[in-house]
């Protein structure tokens, strides 16, 4: 990946709010994306990721808040700022009757570029591997190739910031690997903002993570930061000599958030991974429930467990 | 201007790239010729005039032009490409004017395809070229109103058929306002207002070779009004 420069921000969003009628899609979201980094915008469906991206790219106006791209106010700047951004929307909209060549030439012209059109088209066609379908109509291309065309139209004008909304959505596993490889390559040259709810994608591609849930930012930081710590809490693996029910009851008393409980358990032992302020409350709860604590080990978390814990915390607060 | 031409060219390209374009270019002149030569009284009158040809135009434009414009925004909304367009460095007015210029180009091509009718009449007798030219100018201006309204209604729905039906219905209604004004129960002031807004009445004098500034202003003003509304619809979508 291109080495991130956290002192220069490609994106700075503050207090972003947007409602659709009575539904609050964004409730005062702040986040940043440094120049040169791949920032993953993570969250379950309906978290507000696409709404935030649409505001960033200018196809939607917020109810409140500010958006700065490369230091300029994106909500008040003219069209020139848009030329510095390439965007692949969710569902990758394209004109089915146009050929790949026409689509890219059209995108090039619409980005206000003049001259060297064909060399720009050829460059991007080679970089995303569109040679086999260059003269084919979009409606005749496979979904994988259509996704590449979408990516190519986002890159045709050589933007500094590339925003990709769920770039692997709906692709088969092989196509997912190919698109991820393209995004990884892209991250070596440009600032990338990527939305997804696919956790391995974030772990494979991103330098930084912004986790959204129900229109609010839950956590933001580097991958290492967000998987190890959340507001002073730490992950622990807990094993007791009892049933799953005994363990749940004990953890409820301790008042901790259960992240995972899929560990092999027998009738004699049960395990779980929890998010807690420290080990003391778990120890005391085990004593209270007359359970022997076989294991209470601090653990570096995975993104998956963090995602699960932070977005499902209320439901699983055992 | 560059972006306006870019989008106009794209609309023209879609039209000539699809069979629908060629069907329109073949069916419209053939229908107009049939109405003029066969359904009308051209041969009975023994007069080389295109008066009856232009009489059909208000209704023909009300049906044809919305068919040309119905997909222009609806399809962008349905395919999701509208979102992409809004993220590109293009002003809303450039998008609207680009689509409108594209629609006018299609209208021009379609009217050009009817040129065989005045040419046939000219072959059969002496035709007043000025009257024919004024008639075509009037038709083009009438078509511009139809195109701007068609685009506006296309921008309000993702369903092309709904866009066509609603545009055609409104345009036909706008052509019948003068007729409604003749009803006895209508107060004179309202009758005058209805006549003023009747598309057919404004077109009528032009089809007879009289180019009046009031008619020109009416057509241009109404076109501008619908185009501004189209821009407002797009702007409202940014705030949805």
Image (cartoon, coloured by chain):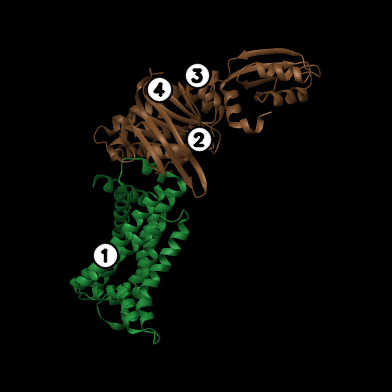
Residue linked to disc 4: A37
Above or below, comparing residue A157 to residue B97 in the picture: above
Q: Position of residue A64 (x, y in %)?
A: 40, 42
Q: Which residue is mark 1?
A: B221
Q: CA distance from mark 4 to mark 3?
A: 15 Å
Mark 4 or 1: in front is 4
Q: Secondary structure at mark 1?
A: helix
Give the image quarter of residue A307. Answer: top right
Q: Is residue A311 above or below residue B95?
A: above
Q: Which chain is green?
A: B
Q: Residue A180 vs residue B129: left or right?
A: right
Mark 2 falls on what kind of element?
strand
Is B100 placed above or below B46 here? above
Q: Chain of mark 4?
A: A
Residue highlighted by disc 3: A225
Q: Earlier in the sequence, mark 4 or mark 3?
A: 4
* N-terminal label among 2 and 4: 4
Q: Is residue B184 above or below residue A304?
A: below
């Amino acid at each position: 990946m291109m080495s991130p420069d956290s002192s220069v921000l490609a994106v700075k969003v503050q207090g972003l709010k947007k409602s659709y009628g009575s539904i609050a899609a964004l409730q005062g979201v702040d986040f940043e994306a440094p120049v040169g980094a791949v920032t993953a915008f993570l969250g379950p469906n309906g978290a507000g990721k696409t709404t935030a991206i649409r505001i960033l790219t200018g196809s939607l106006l917020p109810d409140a808040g500010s958006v700065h791209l490369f230091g300029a106010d994106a909500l008040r700047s003219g069209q020139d700022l848009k030329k510095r951004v390439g965007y692949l929307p969710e569902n990758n909209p394209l004109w089915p009757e146009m050929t790949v060549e026409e689509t890219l030439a059209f995108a090039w012209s619409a980005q206000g570029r003049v001259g060297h059109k064909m060399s720009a088209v050829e460059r991007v066609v080679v970089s995303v591997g569109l040679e086999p379908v260059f003269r084919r109509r979009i409606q005749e291309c496979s979904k994988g190739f259509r996704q590449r065309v979408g990516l190519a139209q986002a890159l045709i004008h050589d933007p500094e910031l590339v925003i990709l909304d769920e770039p692997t959505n709906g692709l088969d596993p092989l196509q997912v690997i190919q698109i991820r490889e393209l995004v990884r390559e892209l991250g070596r040259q440009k600032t990338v903002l990527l939305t997804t709810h696919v956790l391995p994608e974030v772990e494979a591609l991103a330098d930084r993570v912004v986790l959204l849930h129900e229109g609010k930012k839950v956590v933001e930081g580097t991958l290492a930061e967000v998987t190890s710590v959340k507001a002073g809490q730490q992950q622990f693996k807990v094993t007791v000599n009892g049933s799953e029910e005994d363990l749940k009851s004990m953890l409820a008393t301790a008042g901790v958030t259960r992240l995972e409980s899929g560990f092999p358990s027998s009738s004699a032992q049960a395990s779980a991974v929890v998010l807690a302020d420290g080990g003391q409350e778990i120890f005391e709860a085990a004593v209270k429930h007359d359970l022997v604590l076989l294991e209470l080990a601090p653990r570096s978390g995975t993104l998956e467990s963090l995602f699960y814990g932070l977005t499902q915390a209320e439901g699983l607060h055992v | 201007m560059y972006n306006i031409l870019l989008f106009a060219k794209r609309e023209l390209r879609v039209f000539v790239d699809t069979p629908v374009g060629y069907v329109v270019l073949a069916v419209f002149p053939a229908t107009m010729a049939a109405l003029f030569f066969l359904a009308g009284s051209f041969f009975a009158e023994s007069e080389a005039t295109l008066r009856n040809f232009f009489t059909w135009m208000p209704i023909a434009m009300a049906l044809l032009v919305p068919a040309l414009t119905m997909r222009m925004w609806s399809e962008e909304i349905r395919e999701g490409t509208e979102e992409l367009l809004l993220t590109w460095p293009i002003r809303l007015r450039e998008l609207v004017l680009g689509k409108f210029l594209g629609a006018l180009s299609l209208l021009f091509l379609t009217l050009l395809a009817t040129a065989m009718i005045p040419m046939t009449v000219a072959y059969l007798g002496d035709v007043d070229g000025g009257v024919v030219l004024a008639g075509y100018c009037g038709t083009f201006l009438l078509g511009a109103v139809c195109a701007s309204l068609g685009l506006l209604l296309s921008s309000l729905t993702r369903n092309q058929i709904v866009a066509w039906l609603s545009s055609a219905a409104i345009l036909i209604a706008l052509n019948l306002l003068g007729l409604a004004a003749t009803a006895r129960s209508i107060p004179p002031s309202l009758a005058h207002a209805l006549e003023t807004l009747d598309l057919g009445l404004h077109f009528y004098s032009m089809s007879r070779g009289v180019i009046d500034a009031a008619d020109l202003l009416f057509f241009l003003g109404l076109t501008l009004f619908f185009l501004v509304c189209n821009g407002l619809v797009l702007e409202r979508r940014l705030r949805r």
